[in-house]
Image (tube, grey):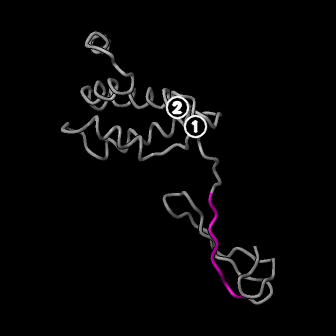
């Protein structure tokens, strides 16, 4: 690590501690040449996950887009923001646990529905009706019957 004061390329780590809930590591360093101290941060470099949409176009994964869809499904339902964030966190964990860096939007929707089902059944059906593009009342009833039979 190059010293910001003298440009010398060797330093020692004096102190190291996690920050941002373990997402980054803060390191205090001391330059071997001028003995001045400076701070560096270490983060994990991630490659962005790409979402393959229905029309085969690709776009970067957007947490807010998923969260907004779930918020709409949970509108006027007794679902807290913490529960919604928890669903989004679980979906993200599923997405990032895959080896592939490209995930279909259908898979993301299935993950979300899986977790929404446990949080609020009405929100689940609302989300499913948009995500699975129900064409008529019969497809809606099929989904409701599946939900009832699982109980």
Where disc 2 sits, the SS reads loop
Q: Residue 67, located in which quarter of the rendered image?
A: top left
Q: Quadrant of the C terminus?
A: top left
Q: Residue 18, located in which quarter of the rendered image?
A: bottom right
Residue 39's place in the image compared with 64, above or below, is below
Judging by the rendered image, the residue that carries numbered circle 2 is: 53
Judging by the rendered image, the residue that carries numbered circle 1 is: 58
| Magenta span | 36-43
Please say whether residue 38 is one of the residues in the magenta stretch: yes
Say which label, 2 or 1, has the lower sequence index: 2
> Residue at the location (29% across, 24% down)?
125
Residue 74 visible in this rendered orientation of the protein: yes
The answer to the question of whether label 2 and label 1 lie on touching residues, with beta carbons closer than 8 A, is yes
> Residue at the location (64% across, 33% down)?
100
What is the distance, in whole Å, between disc 2 and disc 1 at their CAs? 6 Å
Residue 130's place in the image compared with 139, above or below, is below
Judge left or right: residue 7 versus residue 145. right
> Residue at the location (64% across, 47% down)?
47
């Amino acid at each position: 690590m190059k010293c910001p004061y003298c440009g010398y390329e060797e330093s020692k780590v004096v102190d190291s501690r996690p920050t941002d809930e373990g997402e980054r590591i803060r390191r205090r360093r001391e330059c071997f040449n001028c003995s001045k101290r400076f701070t560096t941060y270490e983060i994990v470099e991630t490659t962005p996950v790409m979402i393959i949409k229905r029309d085969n176009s690709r776009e970067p994964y957007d947490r807010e887009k998923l969260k907004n869809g779930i918020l709409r499904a949970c509108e006027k339902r007794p679902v807290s923001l913490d529960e919604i964030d928890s669903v989004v966190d679980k979906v993200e964990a599923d997405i990032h646990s895959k080896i592939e860096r490209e995930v279909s939007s259908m898979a993301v929707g299935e993950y979300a529905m899986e977790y929404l089902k446990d949080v609020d059944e009405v929100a689940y059906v609302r989300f499913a009706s948009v995500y699975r593009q129900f064409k008529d009342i019969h497809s809606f009833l099929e989904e409701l019957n599946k939900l009832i039979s699982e109980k």
